[in-house]
Amino acid sequence: MSSALTIRAVANRTGLTPHVIRIWEKRYAAVEPQRTDSNRRFYSEKDVEKLCMLGWLIRNGHSIGSIASLGLEELKNLVKSAPGVAIAGVHGQAAGTGAEDSASRHEATALKSIRDLDSRGLDDALNTALIDLGGRGFLQKLMCPLAQRIGELWSAGEITAAHEHFASAAIKVFVGQIARSFLPSESAPGVLVATPHGQAHELGAVIVSAAAAQMGWKTTFLGANLPAAEIAGAAIQNKVRAVALSIVYPLDDPVLPSELRQLRKSLPDETRLLVGGRAAHGYETVLEEIGATRVGCPQGLEEELNRIRQEAVS
C-alpha cells in the first residue's frame, strides 16, 4: 500500500479530474482501486497507465463505454494504430493541440441539447467535454463562454426562459459535482459566492464557485438574488477572505448600486469584494466608488484570488 496513489495524485498524473475518475470507476469499471477500511481509494501505477491511455483515446474519438473494459495491451494497440503516435507521449498527456476548436465543438453540442431540452444529451456533452478538456480547461474554455452564450441567446429571444432555466439547473448540478471533488485543507482561505438582490441568473456564480474550489479555496455558495445584509452576514459568519458576486442582467438596475454600497459598508474592511459577469461593466462607477475589483471568468478570478492569498502570507 505504500506505493499506492490517492485519487488526487492520480488526477495530477493523468490530467483527469477526480470527478471523471470516479465516474469511469463507478459506471464503467475502468479501474478497480484498492480500498482501506474507511473506504478510501488507492490506485496502482497500472491504474494510472490505463487511465492515461483511456483519456488519450477518448480525446481522439473513442467512447469510454467501448474501451473501458479493455486491458492495457489492447489499449496500447489502439494507441499504436493511430497515425504518428508514440506511446511515451501518451502517458500523463492532458488536452493539447486544438483545445479551442474542441471547446467550440463541445459548446455547439451542449447548445443543441439545451435547445432540445435534452437532459441526457446535455449531461453526456458535459461529461465528454470534461474528459476532453480537463477540469481547468472545462471551466475556462467551455463553461464561461457557454454561460455567456446562453445569456446572449436568452436576451435576444432566441431561446426561452424555460431553456435558460433548464440549462442553469443541469449545469449547476454538474459543476457542483466537480467542485465537491476538490476538498480544501482546514487552513484554506474562504470565499463566498452569490448574486446580489435583483440578479436571478446564477450560472456564472456556479462556475465561479467551482473555479475557486479547484484553486483550493473553501467556497460558500449562496445562490441567487440575495440582499446585501444576508450576503454580509454569511461572509462574517464564515470569516471569508473574499466575496465574489456575479452580475448578469440587467445593465441598469436602479436598486443594485445601493445594494452594493450597503454590502461594502457591512463587510469587514479586510474582506475583498470581487465582481464579474456579463453586466458588471454597467455598474463600473459604483464598483470603483466602493473599491470592488472587476474580474473576468475565470482567469481574472484566479489571478485575484492568488493575489489575495499571497497578500495574506506576505
Image (spheres, grey):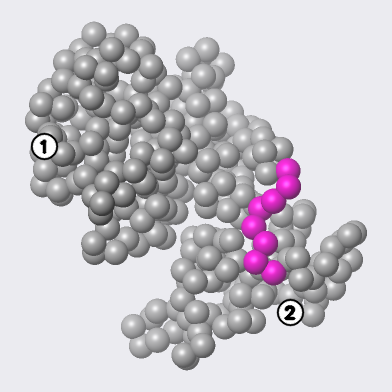
Q: Is residue 226 magenta?
A: no
Q: Residue furthest bottom?
A: 1
Q: Give residue 94's quadrant in the image.
A: bottom right
Secondary structure mostly taken by the magenta-highlighted segment of the chain: loop
Element type where label 1 sits in the image: loop
Residue 97: x %, y % from top left: 73, 47
Residue drawn at x 10%, y 26% is 265
Please give the residue where the numbered disc 2 appears in the rendered image: 71
Q: Nearer the viewer, mark 1 or mark 2?
A: 1
Q: Amino acid at mark 1?
A: Pro
**Residue 201 shows in this picture:** no
Dot 1 surroundings within 10 Å: few (below 14), some, or many (20 or more)?
some
Residue at 38% across, 17% down: 281
- The residue labelled by disc 1 is 268
137 w.r.t. 31: above or below: above
278 to 52, vertically: above or below: above
| Residue 313 percent location from the top left of the image | 25, 54
Q: Foreground: 5 or 255?
A: 5
Residue 311: mark: none
Residue 75 can be seen in this image = yes
Instruction: Indicate the position of residue 8 as horizontal and vertical percent values.
Output: 46, 68
| Mark 1–mark 2 distance (CA, rounded to whole Å) | 57 Å
Which of pointers 1 and 2 lies earlier in the amino acid sequence? 2
Amino acid type at circle 2 is Gly
Q: Quadrant of residue 60?
A: bottom right
Q: Mark 1 and mark 2 in contact? Answer it, CB < 8 Å.
A: no
Residues rendered magenta in the picture = 91-98
